[in-house]
Image: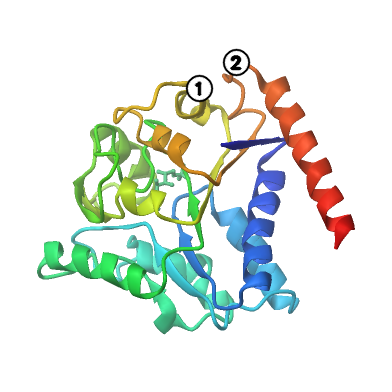
Amino acid sequence: MQIVILKDAAQVAEYGANIFIEQIKNKANSVIGLATGSTPVALYQELIKKNQQNKVSFADVTSFNLDEYLGLKGDHPQSYRHFMGEQLFNHIDIDVNNTHVPPGDAKNPLTACNAYEDKITKAGGIDVQLLGIGRNAHIGFNEPSSGLTSRTRVKTLTQATIDDNARFFAEDEYQPHLSITMGIGTILDSKKVVLLATGEGKADAIKDMVEGPLAAICPASALQLHRDAVIVIDEAAASKLADTEFYKHIEAENQKLIAHLANLK
Ligand code: F6R
C-alpha cells in the first residue's frame, strides 16, 4: 500500500483527481471505477474544473460505479445514479451511455449482478477504481464479514451504514437497507485502486485497514493484497496510525524516485 498523508481534504481531493487525470491523459479510453458519498465530491469538482478548462477529456472514458441502493430507480433523487449525474456526469463531456451504475430497479437483481460483472469484463476491466471507506471499514457496500473474494451481489446494509447515510434522506423518506455492490474480489481485480479518506471519524477504519490483520471483519484490509493501492488521507484520518512519520518518509522517497524517472525521459 502506498500511504499518502496530506494536510487537509482539499489536498486529498487534488492528489486523487490528478491520478485520474494522468490515467486518462495516458489512455483516453480508460475504464474508471467511481464512488459516491461525501468524500469524492471535492475530487469530482476538481475533475469538472479540469474538464471545463480543456485539460482533460472524458469523451472516450467508460465508468463503472461501485454500488447502488436496491429498490431505487435511477431517477430517484437519493439513487447513486442521480448523485453521479448531479456531482459529475452532467458537468463533463462523458457519454452517459458509457457510464454504468448497478441497476437499483432490476427485476432480477441476481441476473443484474452477473450482467454487471460481464460488462466490466467486456470493457477490459477497470484501470483505476476510486474508493471511500465507511467508519466500519466497508468498501463499496461490502460490510464487515463480506467475503474477501466476493463478486457483484446483493448486500444487506448494517445498521451503522444505514445510520451514517440517513443524513442524505428526509426524516419520513424510505431509506433502502439493501444494495447491489461490486464485491471485494471485483474491486481487487482493478488494475489500480485509490482510496480517499478525510476526518477523524475515519481514523479507526484507516488504522485497521493499514495496520490491522487481513480479515473479513475489516473489508478494506483486503487492499493489503492489492499490488497498486494508493491510500490518500488527511492528517485527521491518519491520526491513529502507529508510524505516520515513516509513511511520510516513504512517500517523500517515492516522489524523489518519480522525479528521477521523469528526468530520464
Ligand atoms: C459509496 C461507497 C461507500 C462510501 C463510504 C464512505 O459508493 O461505496 O463505501 O465510500 O460509505 O462514505 P462517505 O464518503 O460519505 O464517508
Name the spot of residue 58 as percent of width and height, x first. 58, 77
Asked if the residue at tag 2 contacts the one at tag 1, i.e. Cβ–Cβ closer than 8 Å, the answer is yes
Q: Quadrant of residue 125?
A: bottom left
Q: Is residue 15 above or below residue 113?
A: above
Q: CA distance from mark 1 to mark 2?
A: 8 Å
Of residues 158 and 108, the one nearer the viewer is 108
Kindly identify the amino acid type of the residue bearing the numbered disc 2: Ala
Which residue does the numbered mark 1 point to in the structure image? 211
Which residue does the numbered mark 2 point to in the structure image? 242
Q: Is residue 103 visible?
A: yes
Of residues 62 and 8, the one nearer the viewer is 62
Residue shown at 55% from the left, 47% from the top: 228
Q: Going by the image, does 33 lie left or right of 16?
A: left
Q: Quadrant of residue 103?
A: bottom left
Q: Quadrant of residue 145?
A: top left
Quarter of the image with the C terminus in it: bottom right
Name the spot of residue 247 as percent of width and height, x first. 68, 27
